[in-house]
Image (cartoon, rainbow, N blue to C red):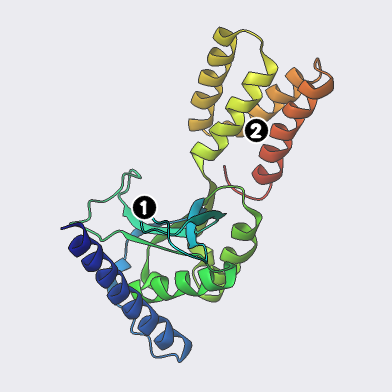
Amino acid sequence: SLKRIERLTYYFGSVGLSLRQAKIFSLQHGTLVSEPILKDQRVVISADGGRTRLRNNKKGRRHPKTNRRGFTGDWVEPKLLTIYGVDEKGKKLKPTRLTITNDGTYGDYKVFLELLEMHLVSLGIADAKQILLIADGAEWIWKHIPPLLERLGVIHKTDQLLDFYHVTEHLNSFSEAAFDKVEEQKAWFKQARHDLKKGQAADIIERMKEKAQAASGATRKIMDTQINYLHNWASTVNT
């Protein structure tokens, strides 16, 4: 029945949260056991913010026909993490070779950092061969996660990468503002996306600047916004 599925789901979730909290408690008291799971592995750490709604029931009487209370669905941002391994060509390892870790929290960045640290320590991040940090342009990620990796003693073998798909969203917004015809928008975006895969971010930004010089008004503002985003993060992160 649906009620049984719901009951089992909530029970499974509560057990998982209890186990997670026990590990965080051990981390706080310096007793967390570090397993050699990531030893000699190429590890990717991906951090991102999401967007979801939380259901909050309204107070008062239930509806006479449905026997339900009304509710509000307030938007909140969960902070999410994924830790997985890749081979020498950068392809994701299958879970049978290395377990993928997914987790998240509705707490603030401090809660998230503690959660991330717990997983990294538990998995044995100190023995990893190479580490890649991938994220979007959210300032809190780049401000707080690198210091954590430095404290864990792995910053010297960590590369930082601005997430490819977040960058392409900004390239697409630029092309839509820069060109009137859909065919031209698609052609420019396709070429820019190809060049980005080849690591030519600096060249793309220069072409964007040249194109923006001929624009004005609201169009120029949109184009400058996308350029500034890429320029600011290209100066701090290896794109």
> What amino acid type should be assigned to the residue bearing mark 1?
Lys
Q: Position of residue 205 (x, y in %)?
A: 68, 29
* Residue at image location 32% in from the left, 67% down from the top: 38
| Quadrant assignment for the C terminus | top right
Circle 1 residue: 65
Q: Is 23 left, or right, of 4 in this rendering?
A: right
Amino acid type, residue under disc 2 in the picture: Ala
Residue 50 in view here: no
At which x and y percent is residue 199?
A: 53, 34
Residue 106 screen position, x and y as percent: 51, 65
Q: To which residue does mark 2 refer?
A: 202
Which secondary structure lies at badge 1? Answer: loop
Q: In front here: 74 or 60? A: 60
Q: Is residue 158 above or below residue 88?
A: below
Identify the residue shown where x is 56% and y is 23%. Answer: 192
Q: Is residue 113 above or below residue 69?
A: below
Q: Quadrant of residue 189?
A: top right
Q: Badge 2: how crowded within 10 Å, few (<14), some, or many (20+)? A: some
Picture disc at residue 181: none
Query: In front here: 58 or 186?
Result: 58
Measure how far apart labels 1 and 2 are at the Cα level: 62 Å
Residue 82 lies, with reference to residue 195, above or below; the image says below
Element under label 2?
A: helix
- In this picture, is 100 found above or below 152? above
Q: Name the residue: 54% across, 69% down.
A: 107
